[in-house]
Amino acid sequence: MKNKTDVWESSLQQCFGIVITPDEPIMKLKGFDVIQIDFWIYANTYGIYMEEIVVNFADIPSFCFSLLVEIVGLPIEFPFALNMTTQFPTIRFGNIPYKWKPIKRKLKVVNSSEIPIAVCFHVFLPNFKDNKYRPFNLIFDMKNEIVNIDDVELFLVHNKLGKETSEYLQLTPCDLNLEKHSFKEIELCMYSDKIPAIKEKTDLTCYILAYIYLNEDDRMKLNFYYRKSGKHLRNIKIDVLATIELPTFKLDYLYGDTKLQFFVNDIIYEDKSHIDFRLVFQNNNCSAINTTLHIMEPFDVISVSTSDGVEGKDTIFVNPGKTLIVCYLQTN
């Protein structure tokens, strides 16, 4: 026996993404009687649909009436955001050090409808301030290389979104063509090295706006359906959050005296050439620290290690939290 969902889904493929059917297709109507007919509506594609309901009677002419149904909801989904409680889908990059290598994330975009769609993405920086020129953003999306100038629309974006820029956050690709019931991935790349390094943390917020476009045949069919697209359809907003910080070490423990005194006679006559001097640092930040150690002559750094087993010579990667770095020093 087939699953009910499978039966509905198979019917949707031939019915433009919507199925309307009566609960009881055949009913008896007695003289001067009134009956109620329930209709089941199942859909997975947004739009305004017009359905002709035909009522047939035995031995008398039939009649029909029109039923208008509006299906709401956007045709794309982001699986990572299905159980989120925030107002908008939110991507968190977490804590990233200044001048760090680019951090990448993957964003899966799913077309859950019965029609192919095109999605155009734009990145905005909301905390951009320019009181002198008061910039604004105009959107001009091109779905493909062949453009009919009569179908082109230039529209203004709300200035609260800030400045459209990919300086700190870049999307690849910015345009997607999704067939029905398919998915693709876009790559998000955060460039913390382009943000000026300061002692305080920088809470970076970017907005991703997505606009959905349809082919003309899928957008409207006379006496069948009408679907909004472009600026006429509600856009999709995604928040991208990151905290850029300058992680520093805390001197946790010191083995030996902070002030070292050496006498030539001790080194020459007593052969006192090796001095152990160990420092223990702690990374209490939420981001990792890529550390390069340097000490001037006559000392050398002979070994560097962390509490989680990472060893190095002059450069070492220290994870966030309670990870320690240990240095051993000696005289030349």
Image (tube, grey):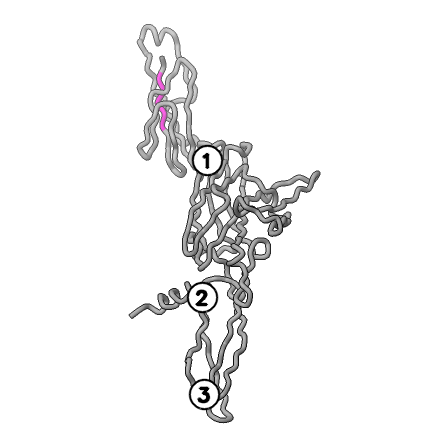
Residue lying at 43% horizontally and 88% vertically, measured from the top left: 28
- Residue 58 circle label: 3
Of discs 1 and 3, which sits in the foreground?
Answer: 3
Place of residue 264 in the rendered image (x, y in percent of width and height, measured from the top left)? 38, 7
Using residue 271 as the reference point, say whether residue 54 is left or right of it: right
Q: CA distance from mark 1 to mark 3?
A: 74 Å
Residue lying at 45% horizontally and 42% vertically, measured from the top left: 187
Q: Residue furthest right?
A: 132
**Up-down relation of residue 123 to residue 328 (above or below):** below
Magenta residue check for 171: no
- Residue 219 circle label: none
Q: Is residue 178 visible?
A: yes
Residue under numbered circle 1: 102
Amino acid type of the residue tagged 2 in the rendering: Cys
Amino acid type of the residue tagged 1 in the rendering: Pro
Q: Is residue 207 visible?
A: no
Using residue 276 as the reference point, say whether residue 22 is left or right of it: right
